[in-house]
Structure formats: C-alpha cells, structure tokens
Amino acid sequence: MEVPEKILVVEFGSQYSHLIVKRIRLMGVYAELIYPEELRERLGPEVRGLVLSGGPMSVYDPDSPRISRDDLLSLGVPVLGICYGHQLIAHLMGGRVERSEAGEYGGVELSLVDRHRLVEGVPERSIVWMSHRDVVVEPPPGFRNLGSTRYIKYSILASDEYRIYSTQFHPEVVHTEYGEQILRNFVYGICGCKGGYDPFDIVEKYIEENRWRGDERALVAVSGGVDSTVTAYILREIFGDNLHLVFLETGFNRVGESEFVSRFFPEQGFEHVHIVDVRRRFLDTLRGVADPREKRSIFSRLYFEVLNEVVSRLEDRYGSFRYLGQGTLYPDVVETGRTSKYTDMIKGHHNVLHRELSRLEPLEPLRYLYKDEVRIVARRLGIPREVYMKHPFPGPGYLVRIIGPVDEERLEIVKRADSIVVEELRRSGLYEEVWQGFAALLGVRTVGVKGDTRSYEYAVAIRMVESEDGMTARHYEAPHSLLDRIARRILDEVDGVNRVLYDLSDKPPATIEYE
Ligand code: XMP
C-alpha cells in the first residue's frame, strides 16, 4: 500500500505478529506485515522503521527464520526486536543467547536499570509479558541494558549508534502495562513518524484507483455480516447500479440473515439484490459428511458452483459480469504462525479459496484492513451500528458448529441454540463486550431424565470469547446469571438437547470455532 510513512513488521512466526501491526496502526501510523525473505524488496523511502516480531523457534535452530547481519546494518532505519527478534539481534550482533533454566512465562515485574527515550514514561517497576525460553545472557558490544526482571538480566537492549533496540518481553500484548508507551516511543520518538493514518483513507484511495472499472458489472455475495456489507457499500461507490448483490440462502447462514439482507439492502438504495434459496441442495450434498476438512471443502466448492450458475443466469438477463467483490481482510492475506506448531490448525480459508473457484476477477477493498478498522470504515460510511458490530461468523456457517455428521435435526438444534445465545447476549447488554458468542452442537449424546423417562440426547456447548481479531482469544468470564438463562432456555426450548456446557478454553490451544 502506498502511504506517506509506514513501519514494516517482519513475521517470524509469532501468534502476536498481527497484533504488533494493529497496535501501531491504532496509534496512527500505517504498518504492514512482511515475511523475512521479502525484506529487501519491501524497503522503500516511506519506511520509517522495522519491527522484528517474536516467534517460537530458537536462534540456534538450523531452520529458524532470520535476516542477515548485513541486512540489519544496512537498513537505514531504526529497528525494534521483540522476543525472538530481540534474541536474533543479540545473536547477529555478537552477543550470546541461551536456553534459560528458569524460563519466564506470563506477567513478570520489570525494573528499569537505565533511562532512555525508548522507555520514556515507563515507571521504574512495571509488569511485562514474557513468552520464550531463550534469553540473552551476554549483550552484543555497543548495546546498553535498560531493564531486568528477576531471572532475565538483559530484558531491554538499546544501541543508539546502530539505532537498534529490543525487548525480551512483548510490548504489543495488553498484559505489558506500558507496552503501548514503549511502542509509541519507538514509532514516534525514535522513528520520527508523524501519524495521522486513518483506515478510511485506504478505502478512499481504493475507490479512486478503481473508478475506471465502474462501467462493467460487479457482484458481491453478501452474507449479512460486516465484511461483505462494507464491501458492498464501497463497491457501490465504483459501480453504482452496475453492482449486484447475491445472497445464497444455504441453510447454514446465521439465523435471520436472509430476512435482514432482503430488507436492509433495498432500504439502503441497492438496486439489485438477489436472494437465492439453495437450502435443499446444500443439505442434500452435505448430509452425513462428518470430517471437518471435507465439510469445508465440499461447502466451498458447492458454494462457488452455485454462485457461478447464478452469475450465468444474471448474465442472461443483464449482460456480462466481470468482477466479484470479496470481504477478504488483512489477516486472511498475510498468514502468521507459518513456522509455529499451530500451523496445522490454520483452516482452509473460505475467502481465500474464492480466488481459485470463481471465474470472476476478485476485488478486495478490505484486504489491507483489520476487523476493527473495517468497523471504523463502516461507521464512516453510515452503516448502522447494529450491523457493523455483528459478531464474526464463519463462511461455512453452522456447518463448522455441528461436530460429526450433518443432518436436518442437528442443524436445527444448533441454529435454535445459537439464536438463544445471541438473543440473551443482546438482552443482557453484553453482546459488544465479546468478540464472538455462539452455540455448537457437540457430537455426543448423554443420558438425562425428562419427566419420568430416561433421555439420551445431545450436548450443546456455549462459547463466548474475548479477542483482538480472532488470532488469539480468551474465554469470556460470563456472568453466571447469563449462562444460567441461556442454559435453561436451551434445555426448555430446543428439542433433542439435555445438557449445556460452557467452554473455558482459550486460543491457543483451542480455536474459536470447533472445526
Ligand atoms: P478459529 O476457529 O480459527 O477462528 O479460531 C478465528 C476467526 O475466524 C472465523 N472463522 C472463519 N471466518 N471463514 C470465515 O470467514 C471461515 O472458514 C472461518 N473459520 C473461522 C472464526 O469465526 C473466528 O472469528
């Protein structure tokens, strides 16, 4: 993306890499995530600084990701290394890194031992977040130590001569009390950024640069969710009445979305809104499929098969279509954790598959943005709050919330249970406090009693998580009264369920969705 100033964040496999980028953007400076091998080609005159992210590997692992000492010394911009980045810098610059006996994890107390503008505004003692076994045991020549914890002497290193700085802890996570201050000191104080980045500028630029396409026809497959809605609004600026919206009612869409789409978009002046009911076809194709990967893959393929047919029908009526607008977000474009043990968990992403399966050219106006930024853009576009604050919902919908084989009964259970969770979250005023709240049907049936008879029915899991972008998540400490209400209602109102469980797992090691 062309912007007047930017910070590049090199991804070394940390689950927090996107968080670093997001934090910097939130303080008003555009940042991008790059892979180590792209470093040279991505350096341009607008780059004001470089951050080296954390990562799960050790600098002594032969295939650990890295950049070279030459790169580090010839960048011409200040560098901040975080965790693995801190160890890599020490290693490349002639210091010594070792696996520590008493590794520090989680929140620990940091004491500043020296003053420097990197730690301006940080009190003498504060809590920082650690998450690596390796530590620097001997700083490289020319580096000063600014802070120590109980077990890790060299927790912040600084060299004004090289303009290289680094921390053993993660300033980007909220548990580091003054992490934002440290990042701010780096970005503004040391790199000299001016600030003023606004995600809406990216959208305006996109519209300007793509106006020339507007005489052709484009289609957005809307789901009722935030991303496709915002995409539709942006593309309308370019295509006007040449924009068509299609809602495929697969039966796996979020409850209420079909009604929402058929009412909302025409009300908002969208000229062409097509609702296509394909519920039978989806259920018939997916009935009995149990394997999670197979479910996703069959769903995506069928989705595009149907969408391509719809395009052909629309073309018979309106003339040819050239573009397909997609709500792809930045985290879908730059995948993190490629080198981590979590790589296998990354799911075949619906949006990314679109590119292969559709015969139309993709348009992705949100591909540089994070969810919170999309919400900021949505507000500026005049989209109502209850629309842009909707929780994320997976592309394959309830399909990934039915563990085991899919059938009508199970689909009905998960939908009814899910609408109860959402309704009660809204009613309690806590809907916006959680990143996502939903129900999933566990594949197991357990014994219970109903009236005087023994029942053998399904268990439903309730999941509510807090998150910043879905890449990591913490289970929500839901008020017991809310959980109680939800459980009672599900047990009373949803046939086939005799047990309700609350999911206490965080991500990692769990994911947010169940499949
Ligand atoms: P996981 O389950 O990987 O989910 O922790 C992270 C976030 O991504 C959403 N998600 C999806 N979104 N298509 C989507 O558009 C998908 O296939 C998909 N799978 C998961 C999930 O709801 C959560 O917000």
Image (tube, grey):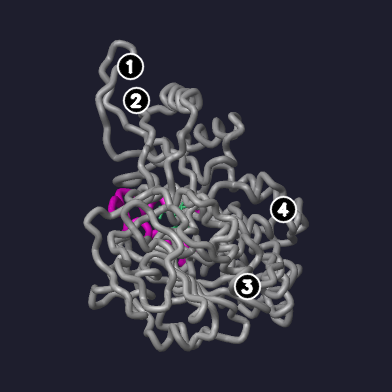
Q: CA distance from mark 4 to mark 1?
A: 46 Å
Q: Position of residue 144 (x, y in %)?
A: 44, 70
Mark 2 lies on residue? 498
Residue 316 lies, with reference to residue 115, above or below; the image says below
Q: Quadrant of residue 54?
A: bottom left
Under tag 2, what secondary structure?
A: strand
Residue 295 relative to residue 147: left or right: left
Mark 1 lies on residue? 450
Residue bounds of the magenta highlight: 278-306
Badge 1 amino acid: Lys
Badge 2 amino acid: Asn
Mark 2 and mark 1 in contact (Cβ < 8 Å)? yes
Q: Position of residue 437 (x, y in %)?
A: 49, 40
Q: Nearer the viewer, residue 138 or 234?
A: 138
Under tag 3, what secondary structure?
A: helix
Badge 4 amino acid: Ile
Task: Decide which of tag 4 and tag 1 comes sooner along the chain.
Answer: 4
Question: Magenta-highlighted stretch: main secondary structure?
Answer: helix
Q: Residues within 10 Å of mark 3 (few under 14, many from 20)?
A: few
